[in-house]
Image: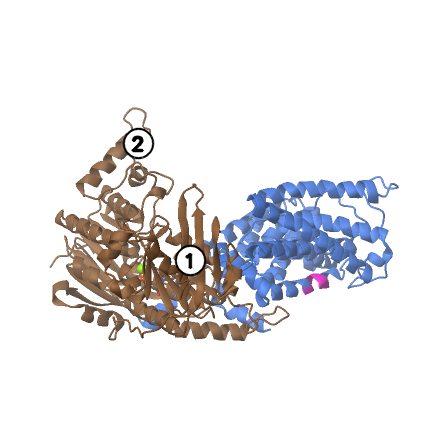
Chain colours: A brown, B blue
Amino acid sequence: MNYLIRTEKLSKIYPNGTFANKSIDFQVAEGEIHGLVGENGAGKTTLMKMLYGEEQPSAGRILIDEKPVTIASEFEAIKAGIGMVHQHFMLVPSLSAAENLVLGKEPKRTRSRTFDMQEAVRITEELSARYNLPVYARARVADLSVSMRQKLEILKALYRGARILILDEPTAVLTPQETEELFAELKALRQRGKTIIFISHKLKEIFNLCDRVTVMRDGRLIATHQVADVDIHQISNEMVGREVQFEISRPPLQAKSPALVVRDISFVDDFGIAKLKHVSFTLRHNEILGVVGVDGNGQTELVEILTGTEKPLSGSVMANGKEITGRSPGFIRRCGVAHIAEDRITVGTALPATISQNLLADRYWRAQFCAPTGFLKMPAMAAEADRLVKDYDIRCNSPNQPVASLSGGNMQKVVVAREFTAEASILVIAQPTRGVDIGAIEYIHARIMDMRSAGKAILLVSSDLQEVMALSDSLIVMHEGEIVAYFPDASAVTDKELGLYMLGIRRQSDDELRKVLHEHD
Amino acid sequence: MNTIKRFFTDRDSLASLLVTVFAGLFSLLAGIVLIFIVSKNPIQSTRNFLLAPFLRSYNFYYLLIVMVPITFTGLALCIIYQLRYMSMIVDASFYTGAVVATAIGTQLNLPPGIHPAVAMLAAGAVGGLIGLLPAILRIKWRANELVSSLMLNYVFYFFGSFIILYFLRDRSQTILSSVPFKESFRLPRLVENTQLHAGFIIAAVFVVLVSLFLFRTRWGYEIRLTGANQKFAYYAGLPVTSIILYAHFISGFLGGVGGAVEMAGLYRAFIWQMNPSYAWDGVIVAMLARKNPRFVPISALFFAYLRVGADFMSRRGDVAFEFITLLQGLIILILASDRIVNYFKERRLKRQVLSRTGASEGGSR
Ligand SMILES: Nc1ncnc2c1ncn2[C@@H]1O[C@H](COP(=O)(O)OP(=O)(O)OP(=O)(O)O)[C@@H](O)[C@H]1O
Ligand SMILES: [Mg+2]
């Protein structure tokens, strides 16, 4: 059989010695949607980067249409018809969608040879209509939603003539509705003869979308299957190398005393837009309170205010009986609040710093690690870092390597390891499993339940609706900066019902909403 | 001893060390080529350039003396660079430190030993406060600290000259000079009949102190973490603003002490006609040391070696002293390219891992 693109004994060793791809024979047929799955750090992104010319193979070769090729740069990848949408987008936020789309291949006015904005917009709108990927051509990228940016990235690749589209975890940042939309669009692209490589940690998506699927583990290609011939259990076993538990065990627990009391918080952003309007709720010990809502309805700002990286316009927040409104993150942490930040790249970790430094950043000053003279107890610090690396199964050569050299999922494990061992009684958790593999998700979910049993109060914000519904005891729904619904029992509500509140179609009465304050129990 | 051993076994430092040595050797080589192009007597000039410290014992001690001020500014800049800031204010701290030391060295009567110590502390304190200014401007008004520090350097240079000229000047001299220092102010000589002074020891002590501070105390840890990602540091609960402030204070403190040591060790009065600008030499020293204070003595030694060689050669031959600036530029160019480091690292590791796993190299590279 002839393949559109295939690799022969392709290997990649990173400068720090990580053997990320070991002799990979990967084959993609023309016109298929090919799923690529594997745990964090299995080497999926690395393999794709070599196809896209961003990394150079250490050994082996790449063949396109059965002809060996060298892809020395992204430029050459584009010439060979390969386009890639990265895990982290690569767009210029201050430019319009149309300008971003044509960047590098701009239309010029015939006479003056200057940039032709009119034509760029026309091209964008035409492509957008042809491939049925709606974007606002004239809007600034900074103002577009995440899903629209993603569509723009896909269009950009198509505009440059991509035959093969690589999508690295495109759904990690999408809501369920947006994901469904994307899938319909990708299937339409397949009909038009495009070939798609699709990376995801969500196996359900692979089964909904793909024709074939390749499993990677530990830098090796384990197997390639027709999706129709396998089931979720077989794939997950191949990925992890053992049986994976999908069910979350939830011992019944009675929520206890109030831990985090939020009253009447309002916030206006730099552009004068009200992001939060009189938000009030009470989070109790032994309770997981889920916050759901379409991305951008104030969840991010709420978390920032609760954890001190942003100051509210008005209102008050009490943690364990102490006033923390507008205080610094350091103060709030010392009041017993830990925080998993949603953006692990720019906030949750220091990429150039070592794993050990990242793990101990919130506790190096404790008596356990630091003498009263200010001298650090290096052996104690090393022991603690070793312990956390082991307990949280962070895959690395040594705790002294920079976090930047870890795969996305392992970076998240560093953040989780630090925050779950922070000796806090309140946990504010944003997107805990974004881009994390099934083995790690299983692990993180189990740990969140442990924290709940240990009496912690947990505020869980996630755009993965399935995740919030499965983990939470109770739910609040946010829409345009307001709490529009409160469900004391998360298991008694369906996702359809939540959808109505998330889109602002329905709203509970004030009496129902007041229950979230827990003032009379 | 342990540190030295770790230094030679730690892979990353070894790779950077290789590049650093390469930068040094290459600049020397380029220097020799240059000499052969411009000099009428290239063999003699090259000999003078390379062997200066060994041809005259004066040159040897001169080498050690030159190391002292650039060790202080190099250490000061290591701290700034660890924080990933760019302030050059240590220039002003150093100069003003010398002026403060002059005031104390000429106006006060204190016992020997105490006298220079008081001067150093006062100069350090003033230098530290000056060091704070660009940091405050940056925090309050987001003013770029490189630009503001370069401007402030002029302000403090002229202010310092003004103090010397109007309050401390020796009117009996025709050139600009302060009144002579009190005898009690002067640092003892380490070797009879040479200029080598106790400031050399003081600099060595500061190398150890700064290394310990940066790598073994919580404050150094905070500086390095803030340098790695300031947003992260704030999120993790570090008091970022005060970290930035005390890092700049300490950096300025080191500059101030350096200025005082230079005065008490080397001179009988303040006689600088212009700003010696040791901060700029400090930039190269800190870069050569890869912003690690432990390596500052080595890079200061090398830098002083170039200086002394160029100086000796220019006085004995037809190559101008300024040719050293060319070599400095070359060193910076090589060091600034991290790609070279990565190239070395990648090649070595690839070989290692491949041999370990038995896979074969080659293919599409
Ligand atoms: N630039 C780099 N330098 C050194 N090592 C790296 C680099 N990028 C990735 N690695 C390492 O290579 C391995 C494979 O990483 P890769 O990003 O390909 O994993 P992945 O399968 O995409 O994982 P994830 O699902 O978490 O995104 C990991 O062990 C990672 O730590
Ligand atoms: Mg990846």
Residue at which label 1 appears: B343
Q: Position of residue B294 (x, y in %)?
A: 60, 64
Ligand 1 occupies quarter: bottom left
Label 2 to label 1, Cα distance in Å?
A: 42 Å
Establish whether labels 2 and 1 are both on one chain: no
**Mark number, residue A117:** 2
Q: Position of residue A154 (x, y in %)?
A: 25, 47
Residue B204 magenta-highlighted? yes
> In terms of image quadrants, where is residue A447?
bottom left
Q: Find out if the beta carbon at label 1 lies less than 8 Å from the nearest ligand 1 atom.
A: no
Badge 2 amino acid: Met
Q: Helix or strand or loop: what does disc 1 sit on?
A: helix
Q: Nearer the viewer, residue A60 or A485?
A: A485
Q: Position of residue B304 (x, y in %)?
A: 65, 55
Residue at horizontal 55%, vertical 70%? A366
Can see residue A41?
Answer: no
Report whether B332 appears left or right of B301: left
Q: Which residues are magenta?
A: B201-205
- Chain letter, disc 1 residue: B
Residue most toward the right?
Answer: B172
Residue at horizontal 32%, vertical 66%? A473
